[in-house]
Each structure stands twice: as structure tokens, then as C-alpha cells.
Image (cartoon, rainbow, N blue to C red):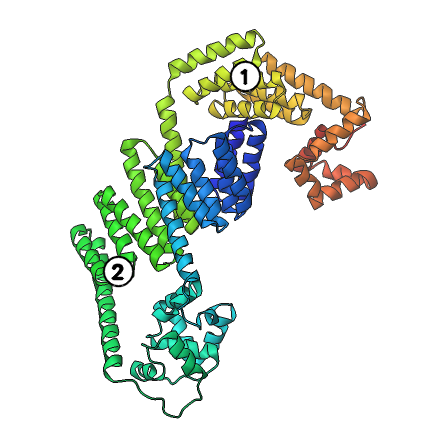
């Protein structure tokens, strides 16, 4: 039962229903409180909900229960990162790598934590950063830039938006972009002062690019002059030439990328690789060249090269504070390559971990589908490797022996093993359903009986198992329907005929009022939870029909001529909702 709850949790997690996943894992933990994997899985679900304190508690419990399991330290590191405890995260990842030095998830987590820690330390220690960096914080920034005619146009330019986002993440980086006239214009708008617009050279003369932070502070605080004192001519020209060269290299890199895209579409993969490589040499500030080349390597079947490019793209993307979508794309591409390799290695776990990491960066439907496919491939492979009809029959026979001895838990164990060995045998599900019925685990037994019918709709024993469980659950109307459905396949089956008789007797007792008020109330309460009963009672037409039966007998007679209405009334009678006397 714990495994079943765990499986439900895993399915909910994969579908992005993290609250449900937490609930299922919690149910599993209640049944198996010493299973370290359950705490690990719930920690991941909590982290996905940004409940990092809960994720940390579960991660610590995982490590406590299984200190030599590397994944526990991966969960511990992720929880610390979510809480901003980067030093503790680095320590956790390193402990995990001491146990499993080749673990890719731990390596990636450590690199991310170290990068974030270094970035934070630079930010805290940047006493020489721009004094205006904090001006770029807050939601009103975008409103001001949109309202100003000069800066409004800049918001349509991706490179400008990237600069703005970088400054917002790390205010000390403002100095890196002051040579761009657009950033100077934006600074003026946010400071509510009028900076002279025009050519880059003219703007550079207003605020010298080579000035130190203290020089700028003095200039801002000084009395405005009609004609600001110009800097020496040579220095602005040097900067402008450098800027011009950078722009030309970026433009050339884009042309190489477009040429690579064209070659890729024509399946001229070697040419595409050459163009993307050249683009990378011209501009190392755009990781799309790396991810594109990785895509080419993927098509060429060079999976190791693809993975290397994806790792480089993630590492470089972290340094550049690239969009999370770009990071996720690189991880997804790596996961796809790992899936290809898994078809030979038969190990889908690395790919699954990478897809899950990609989804934490950006929840992309394509990535989610790839994750689900990888998990299904892993499960199918495990089933194929475990499939053995002969051993399944042996386990089923062992289960039968224990069943005869009334050792039902032991019988369940062997039937379960038989199902794992051959999940397509309806008889095993039928036998395990009988065990569950004896143990009083009626919902589990009902599920097995339904699976038995699904595998073989003509197998009468499946119907008798299912109906018997429904009868024990006092759902006599449903049991009657199941028995009748079974008789369609085996009309002379005595077990099914006897079941119909018992159900009719019980329903008639209810209608005649021969059951206790307490039992009637219990049956009605259970019936009210049935979606079909709820639908009937919420139908405006049926509400009117029931009212007519009480107040308008003539109209009620007309209703009985309608087969659909008659069927619904019979359903309510069988369920004990209404009584006929």
C-alpha cells in the first residue's frame, strides 16, 4: 500500500500536481515511516511548491535514515539553495559527491550553488559599484521607462531588456553598461533629470565613461553648467571604436547563426556545426550558438559532444544571467541525448533527473512530455527485464497454497510478485482481489477485480469478484449491475445468478423498510457520494419528477413512460435514496 501511494505521488509530481504529490507521499510515509525514498520524494515536491523549510526538514530526515545515499544530499542542497543558505548548499553537494563522485545532478547542483554564492559575494563586496544601481529596483522602473517617449522604444530591443534585467539582478553591474547611450538615457529618466541626448560621443561628454564612481557623484552634485567641459577627444573615440567592433562582431555572429540554421534545415550538419562554431568565436555572450550546435550533434548521433555543449551552455548561461528558458532548453537537450544513450546503457535515471532539473528552470510542456516518456521507458524496460511467465505461474501457485491455508498476507505477497513477473494474467488479479476481500481491503480488491475484467472482459470470475466486493460495501445496486454484466458473457453461471438473487433480496428489503434506520441512513450517505447519484439529483428535470411523485400523481404517471427517467428512478430506488412501498 505504501508503494501504491508512492506511485500515485510520483505520477502527480510528473504531472505538476505538487500539492497532490505531497499528500500521496505523506500517506506513504504514514505506512512506511522509515523509507528514506519517500522523504526524498516529498522534499522534491515541497521544493517545487517553494516550501523550502518543509523541503529541508524532509531532506534532513532522508540523510538521517540513509547517510550513504547520494540523492539525499542533492535534496538537502536544493532546499538550502531555496532558502538562500548557499554555503550550506555547497557543503551538502560536496558531501554527496564524496559518496558518488560521478553523480551529474550533484555536480550540476554544486556548480549552480557555487556560482550563486560567488555572485552574491561580489554583490556584497562591491563597494566600488555604481551609486545609482538601486534606482533600477522596484516595479515603478518599467512604468517610468514606458512613459518617456525616448526610452519607450528601447523596451522593444532585446539587448536593452537584457541589460536592464542584469542590473536589476545585480545593481553593481550598472557600470558595465554606462557606455551604452540608451542606459544613460534610462538613468536620466529614472533620476528625473534631463540628460543631453544625441550621438554616443555627445552623451559620453556629459558623463565621462572613464570617470570613477566618486567623480560621477561629484558631477551629479555640482551646479549645472551650460556647456559641460569636454573630455580629451582621443578617449571617447577609443571607446566608440571598441563598441563599434563589438557590434560588428555580434552582427557577424548572427549571420553565422542564420547560415547554420539554413544548413541545419537542409540536413547539412557539418556545415551547420562550422557556422555555429564560428558564431561562438565571434560572440561568447549568446549561449544559443552552443545549444544550436548541441542540436546538430544530437541529429548526427554524437551524443557525448551534444552533452558537452549543453553543459557549457548551462555554465556560461549562469555566468551571463541568461534567461531561465535558455538554461532549461540546454538541460532539455542534454536530457534528450541521455535518453538516446540510455537505449544502449538501459539507464534512464540520469535523463529523468536532468529533465526534472530543466522543469525547475522553466516549466515547458515539451520538457514535461519528454520526462513522462523517459519515466515510461524506464518502467517498461524494468517490466521487460522482469517479465517471466514461468516464474509468474510458480508465484501464483505459491499464493494459492497460502490462500488455502488462510494465510492471506503471504498469499498477497506471492500474487503481487506474480503480477510483476506477468502483468497481463487476469487470473492473478482475480486471486489477489479475493485475498484483499478476506483482509477487508475492499478498495484494493475492487481495483484488482476491475483490472481483471479489463484484461479479459469474458472472464466471469472477474465480475463475481467485483460484485461480491460491491455487495460487502453495501452498494447493492452497483453489485446487481456487475452481476448482470457478467451474465451477458456467461448466462448460466450459477455464482452470478445467485449474486443477482441476493442483490434483489437486499434491495427489496430496503424498499419494504425491513432494515434499520441506521443502516438505511448509512446506505443513503454512501450513495450520495456516488457521482452518478449526484448527477441524477442535481438534474432539474429529475428534481421536478420527484416533486411530481409527491404532489402530482398524474404527471408522475407520464414520467414513467419515459425509459430514461424510469432508469434513473430505478437507480435511486436501488441505492436506497427513495423507497417504494
Would you name the residue on which mark 2 appears? 284
Rendering quarter of residue 222: bottom left
Q: Earlier in the sequence, mark 2 or mark 1?
A: 2
Question: Tag 1: Cα neighbours inside 10 Å, few (<14), some, or many (≥20)?
Answer: many
Would you name the residue on which mark 1 appears? 461
The answer to whether marks 2 and 1 mark residues whose Cβ atoms lie closer than 8 Å is no
- Pick the quarter of the image with the C terminus: top right
SS assignment at label 1: helix
Asked whether residue 239 is in view, the answer is yes
Rendering quarter of residue 105: top left
Q: Position of residue 173 (x, y in %)?
A: 38, 66
Q: Give left or right: position of 212 versus 39.
A: left
Alpha-carbon span between mark 2 and mark 1: 68 Å
Q: Residue at x 67, y 26 (%)?
A: 475
Rendering quarter of residue 165: bottom left
Residue 109 drawn above or below residue 377: below
Asked whether residue 370 is in view, the answer is no
- Pick the quarter of the image with the N terminus: top right
Residue 365 drawn above or below residue 141: above
Q: Residue at x 29, y 84 (%)?
A: 231
**Which circle, 2 or 1, is nearer the viewer?**
2
Q: Position of residue 226 (x, y in %)?
A: 39, 93
Q: Residue furthest bottom?
A: 226
SS assignment at label 2: loop
Nearest the viewer among 450 and 510 is 450
Amino acid at each position: 500500500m505504501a508503494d501504491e501511494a508512492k506511485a500515485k505521488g510520483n505520477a502527480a509530481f510528473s504531472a505538476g500536481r505538487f500539492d497532490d504529490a505531497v499528500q500521496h507521499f505523506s500517506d506513504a510515509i504514514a505506512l512506511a515511516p522509515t523509507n528514506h525514498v519517500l522523504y526524498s520524494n516529498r522534499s522534491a515536491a515541497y521544493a517545487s511548491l517553494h516550501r523550502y523549510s518543509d523541503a529541508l526538514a524532509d531532506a534532513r530526515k532522508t540523510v538521517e535514515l540513509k547517510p550513504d545515499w547520494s540523492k539525499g544530499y542533492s535534496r538537502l542542497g536544493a532546499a538550502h539553495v531555496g532558502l538562500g543558505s548557499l554555503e550550506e548548499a555547497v557543503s551538502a553537494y560536496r558531501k554527496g559527491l564524496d559518496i558518488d563522485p560521478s553523480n551529474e545532478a550533484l555536480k550540476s547542483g554544486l556548480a549552480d550553488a557555487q556560482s550563486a554564492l560567488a555572485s552574491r559575494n561580489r554583490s556584497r563586496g562591491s563597494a566600488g559599484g555604481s551609486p545609482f544601481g538601486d534606482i533600477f529596483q522596484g516595479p515603478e522602473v518599467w512604468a517610468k521607462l514606458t512613459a518617456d517617449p525616448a526610452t519607450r522604444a528601447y523596451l522593444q530591443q532585446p539587448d536593452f531588456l537584457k541589460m536592464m534585467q542584469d542590473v536589476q539582478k545585480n545593481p553593481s553591474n550598472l557600470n558595465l553598461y554606462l557606455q551604452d547611450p540608451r542606459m544613460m538615457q534610462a538613468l536620466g529618466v529614472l533620476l528625473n533629470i534631463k540628460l543631453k541626448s544625441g550621438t554616443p560621443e555627445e552623451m559620453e561628454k556629459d558623463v565621462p565613461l572613464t570617470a570613477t564612481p566618486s567623480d560621477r557623484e561629484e558631477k551629479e552634485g555640482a551646479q549645472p553648467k551650460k556647456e559641460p567641459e569636454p573630455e580629451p577627444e582621443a578617449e571617447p573615440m577609443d571607446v566608440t571604436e571598441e563598441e563599434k567592433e563589438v557590434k560588428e562582431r555580434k552582427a557577424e555572429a548572427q549571420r553565422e547563426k542564420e547560415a547554420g540554421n539554413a544548413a541545419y534545415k537542409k540536413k547539412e550538419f557539418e556545415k551547420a556545426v562550422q557556422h555555429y562554431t564560428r558564431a561562438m568565436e565571434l560572440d561568447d555572450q549568446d549561449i544559443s550558438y552552443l545549444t544550436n550546435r548541441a542540436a546538430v550533434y544530437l541529429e548526427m548521433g554524437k551524443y557525448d559532444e551534444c552533452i558537452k555543449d549543453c553543459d557549457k551552455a548551462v555554465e556560461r548561461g549562469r555566468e551571463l544571467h541568461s534567461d531561465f528558458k535558455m538554461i532549461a532548453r540546454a538541460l532539455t537537450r542534454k536530457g534528450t541525448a541521455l535518453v538516446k544513450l540510455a537505449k544502449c546503457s538501459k539507464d534512464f535515471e540520469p535523463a529523468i533527473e536532468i529533465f526534472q532539473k530543466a522543469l525547475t528552470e522553466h516549466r515547458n510542456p515539451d520538457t514535461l512530455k519528454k520526462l513522462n516518456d523517459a519515466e515510461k521507458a524506464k518502467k517498461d524496460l524494468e517490466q521487460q527485464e522482469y517479465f517471466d511467465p514461468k516464474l509468474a505461474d510458480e508465484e501464483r501457485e505459491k499464493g494459492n497454497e497460502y490462500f488455502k491455508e488462510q494465510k492471506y498476507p503471504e498469499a498477497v505477497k506471492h500474487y503481487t510478485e506474480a503480477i510483476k513477473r506477468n502483468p497481463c494474467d487476469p487470473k492473478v488479479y482475480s486471486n489477489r482481489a479475493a485475498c484483499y476481500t478476506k483482509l477487508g481491503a475492499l478498495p484494493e480488491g475492487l481495483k484488482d477485480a476491475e483490472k481483471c475484467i479489463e484484461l479479459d472482459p469474458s472472464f466471469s470470475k472477474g465480475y463475481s469478484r467485483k460484485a461480491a466486493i460491491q455487495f460487502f460495501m453495501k452498494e447493492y445496486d452497483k453489485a446487481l449491475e456487475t452481476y448482470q454484466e457478467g451474465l451477458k458473457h456467461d448466462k448460466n453461471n450459477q455464482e452470478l445468478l445467485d449474486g443477482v438473487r441476493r442483490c434483489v433480496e437486499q434491495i427489496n428489503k430496503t424498499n419494504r423498510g425491513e432494515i434499520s434506520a441506521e443502516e438505511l441512513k448509512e446506505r443513503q450517505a454512501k450513495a450520495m457520494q456516488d457521482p452518478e447519484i449526484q448527477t441524477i439529483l442535481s438534474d432539474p428535470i429529475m428534481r421536478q419528477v420527484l416533486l411530481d411523485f409527491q404532489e402530482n400523481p398524474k404527471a408522475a404517471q407520464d414520467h414513467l413512460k419515459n425509459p430514461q427517467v424510469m432508469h434513473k428512478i430505478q437507480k435511486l430506488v436501488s441505492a436506497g435514496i427513495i423507497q417504494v412501498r
